[in-house]
Image: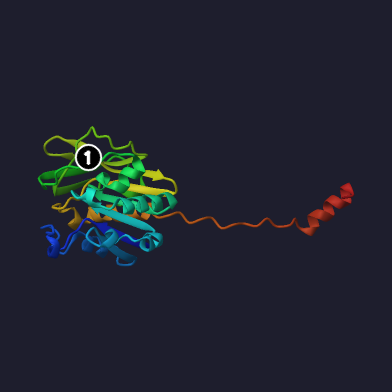
Amino acid sequence: MQLTIFNEYFSPSVGGKPPKNAPESIHTLLAGCFAEDTVCVATQEMPENGLTQDILDKTDVLIWRSSVRNEYVLDSIAEKVASRVLQGMGIVFLGQGYASKPFGLLTGYTPQAATDDGSESLKLICIDPLHPVASGIPSSIRIEHDFIVAEPTSVALPECLIYLEGSRGGDAARAVFTYTRGKGKIVCIAAGGDRSDAYRNPAFLQLIKNAVAWSMPSVAEPIVTAKEEPAVKKSFFKRFYGK
């Protein structure tokens, strides 16, 4: 599998600050979960946001993790990403990826980003344990130092809702949900902000791995060529019908 990880990341040389819970960068933690796959890392500070057409064309699944700088992604790159999803590339949105330009193009959602101050304690609760994305994962996942965008929101109704999330303050929201657009599969995991400890939580990381596996492009069925009827059958019809 060719996996590409996009992260809203700016190095210290251009004023960026690594999250306290992931000083080595979140994309490094994510890449470590897919050691057996071919992984390409793209960050927002790179030319073309690190997502050239050549990279996108080779990508089976794209992980898109973003937070509060979604508006700075190039429009042209967002359009290329959305186009590749329609062609069959899988995509997994993390953090505030639901407020990103590609997600908006694919679902019609007008971004409604939250302030990611890392003040929320979340509990993700599985409501569809039979879905492949939930396979082998506990029925609930605790995450600290995260954010929540409480319902109601204008995010498009998903085809499958797998996890809900609630905060200690009483807010509730959709947490893990899926869509299909064109030939592409989409998973949105609305957790995993800049300050979150989610990326050191084995259950959360397994959730991401399951989402990537589920969104992999389907393998086309082999073309079967029709075979000529056996000679014995032709002889049978000739004997009785003279043909």
Q: Is residue 140 left or right of residue 225?
A: left
Q: Name the residue under label 1.
A: 112
Q: Is residue 100 left or right of residue 239?
A: left
| Residue 182 picture location, percent across and down | 44, 46
- Numbered disc total: 1
Query: Residue 8, relative to residue 105: is it above or below?
Result: below
Image quarter of residue 110 = top left
| Residue 234 picture location, percent across and down | 81, 54
| Residue 99 picture location, percent across and down | 25, 44
5 or 82, which lies in front? 82
The answer to whether residue 183 is seen in the rendering is yes
Q: In which quarter of the image is the N terminus?
A: bottom left
151 or 135, which lies in front? 151
Q: Is residue 203 left or right of residue 197?
A: right
Q: Is label 1 in a helix, a strand or a loop?
A: loop
5 or 35, which lies in front? 5
The answer to whether residue 135 is seen in the rendering is no
The residue at the point 31 percent across, 65 percent down is 39
